[in-house]
Amino acid sequence: MKGIAVLIFTAVSAFAQPPYELLLKGGQVLDARNHINGVMDVAVADGKIAAVARSISSDQAKRVIDATGLYVTPGLLDMHAHVFAGTMGPEYTGTLSVRPDGFTFRSGVTTVVDAGSAGWRNFAELKKQTIDTARTRVLAFLNIVGNGMGGRETVEQDLADMDPERTAAEAARYPRLIVGIKIAHYMGPDWMPVDRAVDAGRRANLPVMVDFADFRKERPFQQLVLEHLRPGDIYTHLYLGAVPMLDADGKVLPYLFEARKRGVIFDVGHGAGSFLWRQAVPTVRQGFVPDSISTDLHVHSMNAGMKDLLNVMSKFLALGMSLEDVVARATWHPAREIRREELGHLSVGAPADIAVLRLISGNFGFLDARGTRLNGSQKLAAELTIHDGRVVWDLNGLAAGDWQSAPPRSEH
Ligand SMILES: [Zn+2]
């Protein structure tokens, strides 16, 4: 008797409860990993992608969202940001960093990677104040400098504090959070900081991200990408004025293609001073496009030419890249580069991190680091962002019911 009662109860509740919590209907799905660029329905259950199909019936979901005319993409992954804000330490260990939640979801971003604001001495602090408290998924590159980016002219030049062993040991302590090693802002003539970062990367089996800072004749950039970096290592700030990109006739220098062939990754890392139209326009037009698109979000870039990840992505639309290519470079490509292949796509079973984007037509202007403008006719906007299956940003109430459908207050 007892067994039958349980059976009936299960059958009834299965009938009463639709299997999916959320259903996005009729959107154009762009998923580079799964080679999808077409109108599909996407269902979410238990914080995971539950189904992606041409048509999923509306009665299968508790909440149905009409995504007709919109683009449904994996939650965006910004792999260069500075989010060590909170305790007001110097520079990127505090005052130049931002709290991620104020910038991410409203731009379709569900994961940010802090690009080396902390080193092995202060990573625990970054974890406690930001990673453990933010709603955004926060990962990190660990700086080769033990004190991280807590002083461009002091701490970050301290060769004695660049310890590959301790850096690799700290990375091994947090394998779910630390995705690589960073070296940045070094002004001296020697290769030692880059080589120590690569040494730490080798010990920890992680990629290295380089901000090459002062370009000096003693350590040519060509040697960085052709000799010092390993396949899978990342150069960020691709469109910095100092990067040798073009010959006297305006042709892309062949060594860049050679470095790419070796497996070196070129990331945008826009920032406040690292994106020039003079570099981006001719190189993209000649087919040398970035592997990943990232912001270098911090206090000085957020209100300048960078603004947010969607604005940086829109710049590449203005340069003639397809939306499909641009979205891949802010989702699946960076996920692969940081070796977090559970992110950046909409496969069944993946975390339900989803961006619903609108492509707006109009007359737009895009600023670079010099304050010069390039005109464009399209711009991306985030209508809806879902993180771990929950709606975390809803610009126009797409996921909400009409106010008149809410019960009167007295009924609560
Ligand atoms: Zn940075």
Image (cartoon, rainbow, N blue to C red):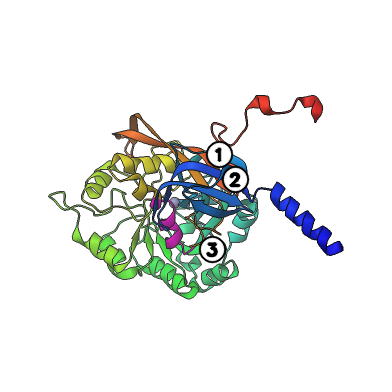
Labels 2 and 3: the sequence-earlier one: 2
Front-lying residue, 388 or 263: 388
Residue 6 place in picture, x, y as percent? 81, 59
Q: Which quadrant of the structure image shows residue 58? A: top right
Front-lying residue, 153 or 411: 411
Q: Residue at x 40, y 39 (%)?
A: 311
Foreground mark, 3 or 1, reads 1
Q: Residue at x 80, y 31 (%)?
A: 412
Q: Secondary structure at mark 2?
A: strand
Query: Visible in this render: residue 10?
Result: yes
Q: Quick check: is 40 in the magenta stretch?
A: no
Amino acid type at circle 3 is: Ile
Amino acid type at circle 2 is: Leu
Q: Quick check: is 329 in the magenta stretch?
A: yes
Q: Residue at x 70, y 50 (%)?
A: 15
Q: Disc 1 vs disc 2: Cβ atoms closer than 8 Å?
A: yes
* Mark 1 beta carbon near ligand 1 (under 8 Å): no
Q: CA distance from mark 3 to mark 1?
A: 35 Å
For disc 3, the marked residue is 178
For disc 2, the marked residue is 22
Q: Is residue 210 above or below residue 67?
A: below
Front-lying residue, 55 or 397: 55
Labels 1 and 2: the sequence-earlier one: 2
For disc 1, the marked residue is 65
Front-lying residue, 194 or 67: 67
Q: Which quadrant of the structure image shows residue 10? A: bottom right
* Mark 2 beta carbon near ligand 1 (under 8 Å): no
Which portion, as a residue range, is magenta? 328-340
